[in-house]
Image (tube, rainbow, N blue to C red):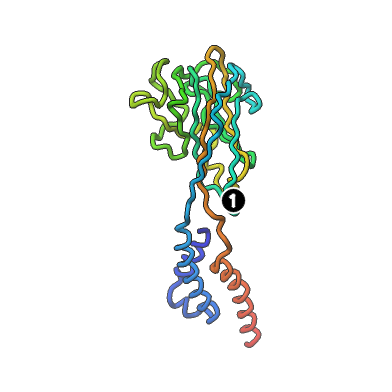
Amino acid sequence: MRLVPVSLRIWSLSSREMFRLTPCFRLIGVTLAIGFAAITEATGETITLHTAASDTVPLAIVDDGYDGSLGSMASKPITLNVGPNLEVVDVDVVVRINHNFVGDLTIKLVGPGGTGVTLLNRPGLPGNLDDGSEVGGDSSNLRDTAPILFDDTAPSGVPSESMGLGLSSATVVGSGPTAGPDNYLPHVEGDPLSLFEDSDPNGLWTLYVGDSSAAAAGTFVAWDLRVSTHVIPEPTTLGLMALACGWVVPRRRAWRSDAR
């Protein structure tokens, strides 16, 4: 796709300018056009969705245990092995948690290369510092029977900071039409899940859940990872011909100059 401007620039030349080009370049121009058509067809690329799930053994989330570090959070790993020559084009996460005070929670995803994204951080708490020091937040609940999706293109369009907004302390988020959405944009003050794009999908993915306030304990039951990939593009005829042109044209100019 990055080669598109090269093609456009070539065809923006007027026909008079095309006439003045050397035979070598006209020939290469034709080859470039053919190469680009092939690439356009090829880049209607195949996107493959890979899904994986963690274990479903409930893991205690230490009440008031989060201090801003990954080590203070409950964690569950997923190892993805989907084959070579692939790169990430999209990542979504589904979480299943039991907790009676969603405003206590911080959720983070760390990928195989060490890249980390904050999905949720203390919804309903103004300023929501990421160090476990503040008290408060939204009082609605999470249940593993009402899983929550985090997606950069979440259909609801609602940021995770607004999770539970307007709900009572007895309401389970995402459990029904009056319980708020079950899908959210990741924490808007952090990085989006697109941060994982173009990375290698293979390896260890870990989801972390931390609790920053006392009196409402919970369990991290499970999570699902959805990674979409495509094949890493191979060198193309277009790229090779562009390189060849960069070598051939100067050579022809030098030869013609010498001839004069």
Q: Secondary structure at mark 1?
A: loop
Q: Is residue 178 left or right of residue 72?
A: left
Q: Residue furthest left?
A: 177
Question: Badge 1, how many Cα within 10 Å: few under 14, some, many 20+?
Answer: few
**89 and 226: which one is in front?**
226
State the quadrant of the C terminus: bottom right
- Residue at 52% x, 52% y is 230
Query: Is residue 8 positioned above or below 252 on the image?
Result: above
- Residue at 49% x, 62% y is 4
- Residue at 51% x, 28% y is 120
Q: Residue 111 in the image: x percent, y percent?
A: 60, 39
Q: Residue 115 in the image: x percent, y percent?
A: 61, 39
Q: Which residue is mark 1?
A: 83
Query: Is residue 147 positioned above or below 135 on the image?
Result: below
**93 and 36: which one is in front?**
93
Amino acid under disc 1? Gly
- Residue at 49% x, 39% y is 92
Q: How many marks?
A: 1
